[in-house]
Image (spheres, rainbow, N blue to C red):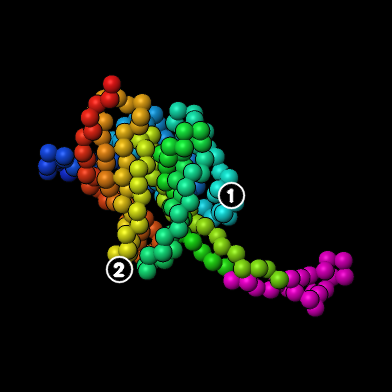
Amino acid sequence: MRIAPTKSPQALSKAGWFGLNFFLIILPCIVVCGGCKTISESRYAIDAVSSSELEIRSKTFKDAQGQVIGCLRWEVANPKCPGPLLLVQYGDLQTRVPTCIEFYRIMSCPATSVAVYDTVKEKMLQEKRQIPCRTNFVLIGKDYDQSVVKNAEVLDGGDSASIAVTRQSPSYQKKARQTALYFIKYNKDFTISRDVHTWISNLPDEN
C-alpha cells in the first residue's frame, strides 16, 4: 500500500517552506527510488527488518543512478524515550558522500539457555545450550535522496525524540543550489514520522 505524495503548506517566508514527497510503505514490498536529482524529490520510507551489526555494516545496494553505496557512518543516540536509536549513513564508497540515512531500533537480547533435543536418542539432554547476550537492530525507517546529508542530529524531547536532518544539493548541481532542514520524529511506539515542513535556504551558484 502506498500513500500518494503530499504537498507542503504555502510558502511563509522568503526562504519558504519546502515539501518533500512522503511515502508510507508496508512490508512485504519493494522500495524503488526514481531518478532523484534535487532535494525536492527526496523519498522517505518505513520498513520492518531485523539485522545484525555485521549485516548492516557490510550491506551495499544501488541508488537510482546505479551507483553502489555502502555504510559510511555509524552513530548510536540514547534519547530517554523511546530509547536507543541507531543512525546509519550510506553513500558512495569512493567519494564518501552520504545520501541515505537508515534508522534502527536497538534491542538487546539477554543471555539465556535452551534445552537441547537429541534426535538420535530421542530425548532431551541434561545439559542446556548457552546463548550469549546479543544486540539486534530493527529497521524502522529510511530517508533517501540524491542530495547530500550534511548533518543528522537526535534531539531528546521528553516522551519522544526528533532527528534534525540537514541536506544540501549534490555537487554536480551547479545552479539553483539549496540547503534543506527538516525533522523526523521518533515516537514512543518505536515508529518514525516525518514533519511536513521543511526550511529551505538558497546557496550561490557554482561556476
Query: Residue 172, image x and y in percent?
Result: 36, 26
Is 204 above or below relative to 9? Answer: above
Query: Residue 146, image x and y in percent?
Result: 38, 34
Residue 45 in view, yes or no: yes
Query: Residue 8, image x and y in percent?
Result: 21, 43
Tell me the quadrant of the picture where the N terminus can be found.
top left
Q: Earlier in the sequence, mark 1 or mark 2?
A: 1
Q: Residue at x 88, y 70 (%)?
A: 121
Q: Nearer the viewer, residue 136 or 177?
A: 177
Q: CA distance from mark 1 to mark 2?
A: 32 Å
The secondary element bearing badge 2 is classed as: loop
Task: Give the amino acid at mark 1.
Answer: Glu
- Residue at the far bottom: name it: 126
- Residue at the far top: name it: 207
- Residue at the far right: name it: 121
44 to the left or right of 105: left
Is 18 above or below relative to 66? Answer: below
Q: What's drawn in magenta, residue-wise? A: 110-129
Name the residue that disc number 1 marks.
55
Name the residue that disc number 2 marks.
158
Q: Nearer the viewer, residue 105 or 148?
A: 148
Asked if residue 112 is among those painted magenta in the image, a careful observer would answer: yes
Quadrant of residue 99 within the rendered picture: top left
Task: Give the amino acid at mark 2.
Answer: Gly
The secondary element bearing badge 1 is classed as: helix
Query: Residue 31, image x and y in percent?
Result: 45, 40
Q: Residue at x 47, y 47 (%)?
A: 73
Q: Residue at x 35, y 35 (%)?
A: 147
